[in-house]
Amino acid sequence: MLTSLSLVTVEGAPALGEVLCQVDDIADVSDGGAKSFRFGIGPHEVRIFLLRRQDKVYAYLNACPHVLSALDWMPDRFLDPTRTLIQCASHGAQFRIDDGFCVDGPCTGKSLTAIPIDVVDGEVRVGG
Ligand code: FES
């Protein structure tokens, strides 16, 4: 089941409607890129990442549903070698880019936590 976490509830994160980045700041998944953010400090730190496929932007919590490890294997690197799936660096779980659903690995059937965003005029903004 897809769950979501609004950044509005995260201390230290930008407010509703604030700009996270420009769409063009996110490398297309065909180039293997992504863009990561951290908000808050200490136990309240929240990490998220954005992926872009052509004009569509996806945002997820950077926490694998298996044991909540960060997913990236290098800064801003979240994809498998085919660049068609998100792949967890810890134990290799694979997730669809479109909806964060885990299709293979120890958390098969679970999903990444989606982060609501809005894309307006080429900007990625905090959604509600
Ligand atoms: S922490 Fe992601 S597959 Fe284990």
Image (cartoon, rainbow, N blue to C red):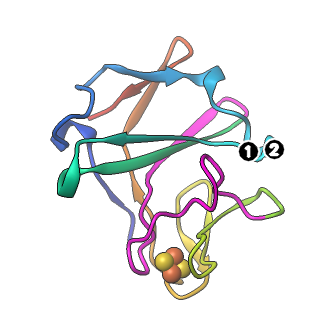
> SS at mark 1?
helix
Measured as percent of width and height from the top left, residue 76 is found at: 61, 46
Q: Which residues are magenta?
A: 54-80
Q: Is the residue marked 2 within 8 Å of ligand 1, measured from its CB? A: no
Q: Residue at x 52, y 61 (%)?
A: 100
The correct choice, above or below, for 59 with respect to 99 in the image is: above
Horizontal side of 67 relative to 45 (left or right) equals right
Asked if the magenta segment contains residue 3, the reply would be no
Q: Quadrant of the N terminus?
A: bottom left
> SS at mark 2?
helix
Asked if the magenta segment contains residue 78, the reply would be yes
Q: Which residue is mark 2?
A: 30
Quarter assignment of residue 111: bottom left
Q: Within 10 Å of the Cα at label 2, are there few (<14), some (14-19), or many (20+) other Cα atoms?
A: few
Q: Residue at x 19, y 58 (%)?
A: 43
Horizontal side of 95 relative to 45 (left or right) equals right
Horizontal side of 81 relative to 12 (left or right) equals right
- Are circles 2 and 1 on residues that touch, CB within 8 Å? yes
Q: Quadrant of the C terminus?
A: top left
Q: Within 10 Å of the Cα at label 1, are there few (<14), some (14-19), or many (20+) other Cα atoms?
A: many
Quarter assignment of residue 84: bottom right
Residue farthest to the bottom? 106
Horizontal side of 128 relative to 85 (left or right) equals left
The correct choice, above or below, for 41 with respect to 1 in the image is: above
Q: Residue 122 or 44: which is nearer the viewer?
A: 44
Q: Which residue is mark 1?
A: 29
Residue farthest to the top? 121
Measured as percent of width and height from the top left, residue 86 is found at: 64, 62
What secondary structure characterizes most of the magenta part? loop
Tell me the distance, in whole angstroms, between the alpha carbons under discs 2 and 1. 4 Å
Looking at the rendered structure, the kind of residue marked 2 is Ser
